[in-house]
Image (spheres, rainbow, N blue to C red):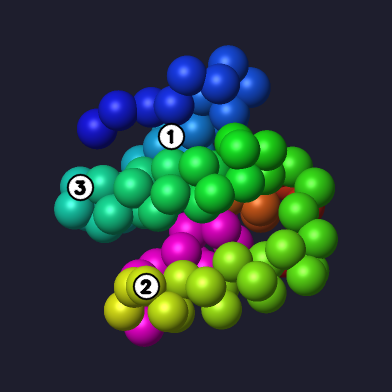
Amino acid sequence: MTAPSNAHFKSQYERHLKQLKLKGLRPKTIDAYARAIRRIGANFDYRLDNLSEAQLLDYFADLLQTHSRSDDKLDLYCLKIFYTHVLKKPC
């Protein structure tokens, strides 16, 4: 598992991993969510703090074209945890 080089995102990424562990998720689930948040981060140049609804709609629409429906749902759940527990923002 490799973390991105962007310092701000890397800090958020590490907090995200801690939150997943504190929630008691299984290691394979944590790995899947870690991959998902890195994929989302890479798509938005590792700036996830203030994504608009339009950006998210475009992302998930594009994701459905290239990935399975389960990946789409995984990214959605992952982003909800990230926003709620790391950014402390409502989903």
Query: Relative to 77, does residue 51 appear above or below in the rendering?
Result: above
Q: Secondary structure at mark 3?
A: helix
Q: Secondary structure at mark 2?
A: helix
Q: Nearer the viewer, mark 3 or mark 2?
A: 2
Residue 27 badge? 3
Who comes first in sequence, dot 3 or dot 2?
3
Q: Which residue is mark 2?
A: 66
| Outermost residue toward the bottom in this view | 69
In the rendered image, residue 75 lying in the magenta stretch gets the answer yes
Task: State whether the magenta stretch is mostly helix, strand or loop.
Answer: helix
Badge 1: few (under 14), some or many (20 or more) residues near its Cα, within 10 Å?
A: some
What is the distance, in whole Å, between disc 1 and disc 2 at their CAs? 29 Å
**The N terminus lies in quadrant:** top left
The one nearer the camera, 17 or 61, is: 61
Badge 2: few (under 14), some or many (20 or more) residues near its Cα, within 10 Å?
A: few
Who comes first in sequence, dot 1 or dot 3?
1
Q: Hey, what amino acid is under mark 2?
A: Thr
Residue at point 74% right, 42% down?
49
Q: Which residue is mark 1?
A: 18
Residues in magenta?
Answer: 69-81
Please identify the quarter of the rendering in which residue 38 is found.
Answer: top left
**The C terminus lies in quadrant:** bottom right
Q: Hey, what amino acid is under mark 1?
A: Lys
